[in-house]
Amino acid sequence: MKFPYTEKVLEHFKNPRNVGKIENPDGKGLEGSPACGDMVAVYLQVNPDTQVIEDIKFESYGCASNIATASIITELAKGKTIAEAKKITWQEATEELGGLPPVKAHCSVLAVEGLRSAIRDYEEKHGLVSEKEPTTVDIVRSRLKHVMNPMAGLDIVRTEIVTKIEVNDGVVRVLLDLPSNHQFAAAIKEDLIEKIESLWDVKEVNVVFTE
Amino acid sequence: MFDKMIYIDNSASTRLDERVMDAMKPYYFETYAVATSEFGYSMGIEAKEGLEQARESIASSLGASAEEIVFTSGETESSNMAIKGVCAALKKKKGEHIIVSKIEDFPVLNTAKSLEKKGYTVDYISVDAEGNVNLEELKSKIRSDTVLVSIQHANQEIGTLQDLNTIAKICKEKDVLLHTDATHSYTRVPIDVVKTPVDMISISAHTIHGPRGVGALYIRKGTPIEKWMDGGYQETNRRGGLENIPGAVGFAKAVELVTPKENEFLSSLRDYTIKRVFDEIPHVTLNGNKTQRTPQNANITFHYVEGESMTLHLDMRGFAVSTGSACFSRSLEASHVILGIGGDHERAHGSIRFTFGRYNSMEDVDAVVDAIKEVVSQLRAISPLYNK
């Protein structure tokens, strides 16, 4: 049979590792991708002395690559300290699976975000988070690195679709080098807004297309 | 290789019927000349006869006359020709406004969008939760400069049949032309142009076990329409390009092979699928009209799971079905049809379209429902939304 996925993706899709919930987890993250409607939940059990992730589980409401990337993320994170696990990137997850179709790269981003949000939850609950920072252009830019350009399978910052970012009194304006009627315009816009509007001091997000 | 595959995606395309192939073959190997006039050579005259007989049968299946049928390369071309051709003919006389429904298939929808870019105004008529076009809205949107209304007969994804008689009546009363894309209803749910005053109908061969790349456009006599493709004088100067005679002959044969009995059989497969799914799987929603739907279509949302995961699991078990999930589409866009019937992303996310054809059986329904039961419970077990 012909599938667009590698053997490893199919293997993790058919037999996902570390599936399920952890009762009373030390950290929990739930992330959704409005670009395609997928969701992923990550649960952590962390050793308070060593900060090592002793157990990790996930749940997925998503497509094959969503399930496979979440599964691989749990394998990569298990046994690592939270500091180490935070550094796992979506590129690493994708590589570990032997690659993903470019249009599915956002799935591995979502899995990594699920993990990071579970870690953030753990840190917040355990008093490990520093003071809230006000949103800056740099913070917006780093968040936009998680918005995929499905044409390239890379983010919209790296592929130079983002031409300008303005942050003004809680209003974020992002200029994109993309016509509004482009095939992926709606998906990118939705994804972008979702990534930025969750910043604590952002009141409004405006996305400007080229026409 | 796909011998064991159970194919339940017949609205995407179908397996060719061997009898269609047999009807086409002589026009490739024996009577392969181009259609000539009656003053040409005999092989060309005979080829022309084959073409015209095919035209006669397609015409009679719609209650039309032969000169009202133009052969095309399929649904996409037929709908482009109908809409753009009429718009070009009436631009100066009538105006630049057209009306389509929100759940049209891409040939109509994207033709409308392309006209919009050229300065036309387009109204997209909404549909209710079952996919029925809002007739009051349609009435209210027709203006003096409206050139054309294009509303499909049956929906490609959810199978809902529109009340074409009433739509045609509204258009006649307001003196505006009506085109309908009947690709997904043709021969399954009859249209008679004598009783239903529709002006143009797009039809296609490949959805009824006919060849790919052949379709037709019915154009009621007297309908103002500009020549579609420049080229030779073919199709009584309405479409240039060498006639696809084997294709036309195969199309006519495919039409002849559809029987009312077969359509009843398809309805029974559809109804049995819906019944088993609703009896045996919790948290499901039927998409589309419960009674006014094409015999071959069952479209069901399985909540808390995603469609591409389902179709991949089913593929690995030997079944071909499709889904309206964004993950399944190249553009990452959820089905505009499911969103159009007021469904949210979630509704499209877990939707599966089963479309049956001649080569399906009750055993296929049992097999696919058994498989989907397993797949859905497996995927729900790992879904964060499903309350276990």
Image: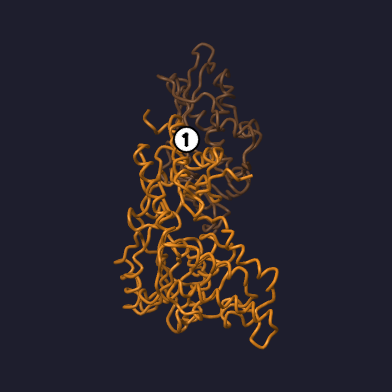
Element at label 1: helix
> What is the crowding at mark 1: few (fewer than 14 residues within 10 Å), some, or many (at least 20)?
many
Q: Quadrant of the C terminus of chain B?
A: top left
- Indicate left or right for B259 with B127 as reference: right
Q: Nearer the viewer, residue B356 or B217?
A: B356
Q: Nearer the viewer, residue B42 or B378?
A: B42
Q: Quadrant of the N terminus of chain B?
A: top right
| Residue B328, image x, y percentages | 52, 46
Q: Nearer the viewer, residue A105 or B289?
A: B289
Classify A144 as above or below B94. Answer: above
| Chain B tint as drawn | orange
Give the residue at x 59% y 50%: A161
User: In the rendered image, which quarter is residue A23 located in?
Assistant: top left
Colour brown maps to chain: A
Q: Chain of mark 1?
A: B
Of the residues shown, which amino acid type is indicated by label 1? Val
Give the residue at x 35% y 44%: B275
User: In the rendered image, which quarter is residue A199 located in?
Assistant: top left
User: In the rendered image, which quarter is residue B245 located in?
Assistant: bottom right
Q: Which residue is mark 1?
A: B375
* Farthest top residue in view: A49
